[in-house]
Image (spheres, rainbow, N blue to C red):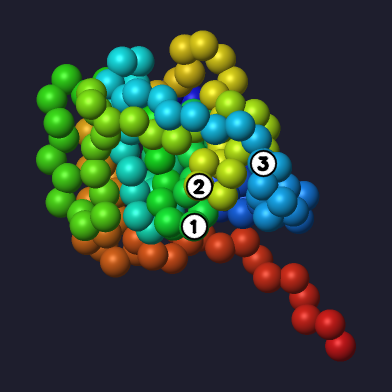
Amino acid sequence: MATDQPDARHDWLRHANRVTGEHRRRWQRGRGGTTGWSPCGNQWDVVAVRPKILGLNALTELRLSPTCGYPVLADHLGDTLYIMVELARHAPEIRTEGVRLLSAGSVILVPYAAGGSPRAHWISPPRQDPPPLPPADRLTQTIDRLAKDGTARTPVERPPSPPARP
């Protein structure tokens, strides 16, 4: 698994907040990118995480870089992160409310074009075929630990604030 660079600790949070005014205008006019349903359980499973910040913190904790092509989607309206993971040989034990594994028989909404929609927006689009996928059990264990530690709902480490204007 690729890891992030030492100075890129906030990339997941930055990528998650990279919804531009142009995205919003397209979505409001109904001109976002094309989306469609994609089945889980064939090439990958998905860990759905609500709230998004919990999943973003887990990805940061695992030191996975959003620039390496790990496929991660955001549902901005439902505050849910969808992280594509390796096919789970057996369902990992998940102890955290708001976290579930989507496998064979489940589908997710994915953007087929750059704009996506507020319900299906790439935070980190796949950059190769097949894309790198974290193991489901490692991700869910990290999520469970962060939730238990109470650090789940705030950024793992916040970037410094800009200086106050006089």
Image mark for residue 97: none
Of labels 3 and 2, earlier in sequence is 3
Q: Looking at the picture, which amino acid does disc 2 mark?
A: Arg
Distance from Cα at disc 3 to Cα at disc 2: 11 Å
The quadrant where residue 112 appears: top right
**Identity of the residue furthest to the front in this view:** 30
Residue 129 screen position, x and y as percent: 51, 11
Q: Is residue 64 visible?
A: no
Residue sitting at x 35%, y 23% = 39
The residue tagged 2 is: 119
Distance from Cα at disc 2 to Cα at disc 1: 6 Å
Residue 11 screen position, x and y as percent: 59, 46
Q: Secondary structure at mark 3?
A: loop
Q: Is residue 136 above or below residue 52?
A: above
Image mark for residue 32: 3
Q: Secondary structure at mark 2?
A: loop
Q: Is residue 33 above or below residue 39?
A: below
Residue sitting at x 64%, y 29% = 113
Of labels 1 and 3, earlier in sequence is 3
Who is closer to the viewer here, 44 or 12? 44
Tags 2 and 1 touching, CB below 8 Å: yes
Q: Looking at the picture, which amino acid does disc 3 mark?
A: Gly
Image mark for residue 77: 1
Residue 100 screen position, x and y as percent: 24, 44
In the displayed structure, does residue 43 sit left or right of residue 11? left
The quadrant where residue 21 appears: bottom right
Residue sitting at x 29%, y 66% = 150
Residue 29 screen position, x and y as percent: 71, 51
